[in-house]
Image: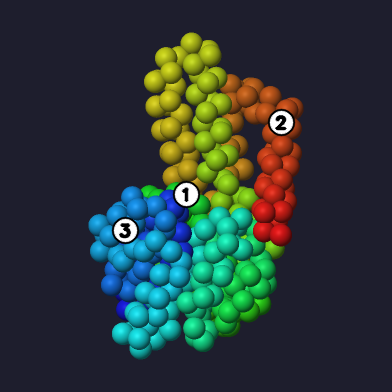
Amino acid sequence: MAENIPPLAVIGGGNMAQAIVLGGLDAGTLDPSRVVVADRNEAKRELFRAAGVEAVATPGDAMSGLCAMERAAGEIGQVLLAIKPQSLDEVAPMLAGAWGDAERVVISLLAGVSGERAARALGVAARIVRAMPNTPARIRRGATGVVRTGSAKEGDTRAAVQLFAAVGEVLEVETETHLDVLGAVAGSGPAYAFYLAEAMIDAGEGAGLPREVAERAVIATLAGAGELMARDSARDPGALRAAVTSRGGITLAAMTVLDAAGVKETIDAAVQAGIDRGRELGA
């Protein structure tokens, strides 16, 4: 319930922050009177205000708001850092200037930025929990990786797990390396699915289908396949694929082309490129 989540300052009001906050409010995980969001964009601030959440223009103002909520609640709050990795060095001094002496948990959504790097940039008493959500969180079907970094204590992931459970499945991992891989698999994964959908639609249209028919067919097919895989007790995509692939049939002909083109190897290379790029951005 809402009272289980400490007061929360959200730094950055982009789409992901919106999904998390609004999802938490809908689920009752967040109490709007215990949340403050910082974003320089007035339209985004208005969106949060319409949901009953305090919204301010700067990270410093958000920290001041958090401190006021902490005094009222009699407990230390947490900070959700939902900015671009490249903005960390710009935003960190604004947070530090209003931080005070309290030691707080910081839930960092900064792709590729290690807990050590984030703590060093903030320069305050912060215990870093890293999280990597993906865009289906917008419809409460997200997949979020969560990890406790070296600066955090046992139990520091509790609020993050509750928060992200409101917008989908939570995957707690043991190391930051695992989280970086999850970022390239699940974080970027929706883009892979959309890429496949785009290619399938184009191929259907190219073979003579009206584009609207191709779009409807592909969207329904991919949504149904995902749901089927989620409901299958074994959750083995290889077995599900084999069940569709009859010997000598049209699906086998298509799979043969994909295998010959090295599609699996290409996907492996794409995931590795994502991992490498995330680490470059976070360096």
Report the Cα–Cα distance between label 2 and label 3.
48 Å
Q: Residues within 10 Å of mark 3 (few under 14, many from 20)?
A: many
Residue drawn at (63%, 24%), measured in percent from left and top? 254
> Label 2, label 1: how many angstroms apart (C-alpha)?
29 Å
**Type of the residue with mark 3:** Phe
Query: Considering only order in the chain, which callout, 1 or 2, is on the residue closer to the N terminus?
Result: 1
Q: Check if mark 2's residue and mark 3's residue have beta carbons within 8 Å.
A: no
Q: Residue at x 64, y 62 (%)?
A: 113
The residue at 53%/13% (across/down) is 207
Return the residue at label 2: 259
Q: Position of residue 239 (x, y in %)?
A: 59, 43
Circle 3 or circle 1, nearest the eye: 3
- Secondary structure at badge 2 equals helix
Report helix, strand or loop for mark 1: helix
Nearest the viewer among 182 and 38 is: 38
Q: What x and y, as percent, mark residue 155?
A: 52, 81
Q: Is residue 146 visible?
A: no
Q: Residue at x 48, y 39 (%)?
A: 225
Tally the marks: 3
Rate crowding at label 1 as few (under 14), some (14 to 19) or many (20 or more) other CA atoms within 10 Å. many
* Residue 196 horizontal/vertical position (percent): 56, 32
User: Where the N terminus falls, by quadrant?
Assistant: bottom left
Quadrant, the C terminus = bottom right
* Figure colour scheme: rainbow
The residue beneath circle 3 is 48
Please tell me which of labels 2 and 3 falls first in the chain. Answer: 3
**Which numbered mark, 2 or 1, is in the foreground of this view?**
1
The residue that mark 1 highlights is 135
Does 101 sit above or below residue 56? below
The foreground one among 28 and 42 is 42
Camera-nearest residue between 90 and 69: 90
